[in-house]
Image: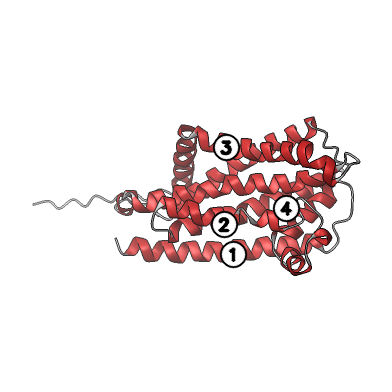
């Protein structure tokens, strides 16, 4: 008898990753409510702080220029948090078992979720900035400052999206992933996002000054308003890179451990 061996050609990593990105984007379009809430909630908070609390916090009417950088990061956080739920869903519904039988790197499913989340976050952030301009936000930064600020925002989104992906991997259910991720969304409230740190109680100032959100917000605020970011930009980049590296290593190790058990 003639033995014929059929060799299945393994697709390239780029093709596999693009397929998973398309899959995640398609799921996102089918779950339009999550995207709408990721945009609507930060906008509602911005309008509330600007028109309800703004007059009491800063009677000069310039509070909108102070609060918008924090709202931008809050928007990024809300958008990234859905990644934890999406990853947890894939890890618990059996789809990973099917991917492991195919000649592909199943870890690319996580990369697909991260890339799709980045696209959704950039869209949401752009909408928030446009609404901010309509309600009175008047940035004074140069084009170079804007480009630098966008780069910092992109790095922040990338780092926290991978962090939420890691949270989704270690969570036993999508509901648990949503709860764990919700805790991280409180970090902007414990920073200089909405009020100066000097107005906080002494015991809280130390926490606000030494957490990763504060240098990112101060960097974006300084760049957009035409000021000097100083050492804040190095702390912001350093924190984001540290979170990114740790999250990728954590995600890779957890995925291999959990997928290997199946």
Q: CA distance from mark 2 to mark 3?
A: 17 Å
Residue 122 position within the rendered picture, expressed as x and y whole percent measured from the top left? 64, 41
Q: Quadrant of residue 202?
A: bottom right
Mark positioned earlier in the residue sequence (3 or 1): 3
In space, the residues marked 3 and 1 are separated at their CA atoms by: 29 Å
Q: What number is the disc on residue 37?
A: 3
CB under 8 Å between discs 4 and 2: no
Colour scheme employed for the rendering of this structure: secondary structure
The CA distance from mark 4 to mark 1 is 16 Å
Res 245 label: 1
Is tag 2's residue or tag 1's residue first in the polypeptide sequence?
A: 2
Residue that mark 4 sits on: 152
Is label 1 in a helix, a strand or a loop? Answer: helix
What is the C-alpha distance between the residues marked 2 and 1?
21 Å
The mark nearer the N terminus, 4 or 2, is 4
Q: Nearer the viewer, mark 4 or mark 2?
A: 2
The residue that appears at 50% across and 65% down in the rendered structure is 250
Looking at the image, do the residues carrying marks 2 and 1 touch, with CB atoms under 8 Å apart?
no
- Measured Cα–Cα span from mark 4 to mark 2: 23 Å
Q: Work out whether residue 90 can be spotted.
A: yes
Q: Nearer the viewer, mark 2 or mark 1?
A: 2
Using the numbered discs, state the Cα–Cα distance from disc 4 to disc 3 in whole angstroms.
24 Å
Residues at discs 4 and 1 in contact (Cβ within 8 Å): no
Q: Which residue is mark 2?
A: 183
Q: Which mark is nearer the camera, 4 or 3?
A: 3
User: Callout 3: 10 Å neighbours few (<14), some, many (20+)?
Assistant: some
């Amino acid at each position: 008898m003639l033995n014929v061996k059929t060799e299945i050609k393994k697709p390239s990593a780029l093709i596999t990753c693009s397929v998973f990105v398309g899959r995640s984007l398609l799921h996102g379009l089918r779950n339009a409510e999550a995207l709408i809430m990721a945009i609507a909630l930060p906008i509602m908070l911005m309008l509330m702080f600007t028109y309800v609390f703004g007059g009491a916090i800063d009677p000069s009417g310039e509070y909108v220029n102070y609060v918008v950088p924090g709202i931008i990061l809050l928007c990024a956080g809300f958008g990234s948090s859905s990644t934890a739920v999406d990853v947890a869903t894939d890890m618990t519904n059996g789809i990973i078992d099917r991917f492991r039988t195919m000649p592909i790197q199943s870890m690319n499913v996580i990369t697909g979720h991260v890339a799709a989340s980045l696209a959704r976050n950039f869209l949401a952030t752009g909408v928030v900035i446009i609404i901010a301009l309509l309600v009175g936000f008047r940035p004074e930064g140069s084009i170079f400052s804007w480009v630098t600020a966008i780069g910092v925002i992109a790095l922040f989104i990338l780092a926290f999206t991978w962090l939420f992906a890691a949270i989704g991997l270690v969570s036993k259910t999508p509901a648990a992933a949503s709860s764990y991720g919700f805790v991280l969304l409180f970090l902007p409230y414990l920073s200089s996002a909405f009020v100066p740190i000097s107005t906080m109680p002494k015991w809280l100032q130390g926490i606000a000054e030494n957490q990763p959100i504060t240098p990112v917000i101060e960097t974006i605020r300084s760049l957009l308003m035409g000021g000097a970011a100083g050492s804040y930009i190095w702390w912001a980049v350093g924190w984001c890179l540290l979170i990114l590296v740790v999250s990728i290593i954590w995600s890779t190790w957890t995925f291999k451990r959990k997928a290997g058990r199946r």
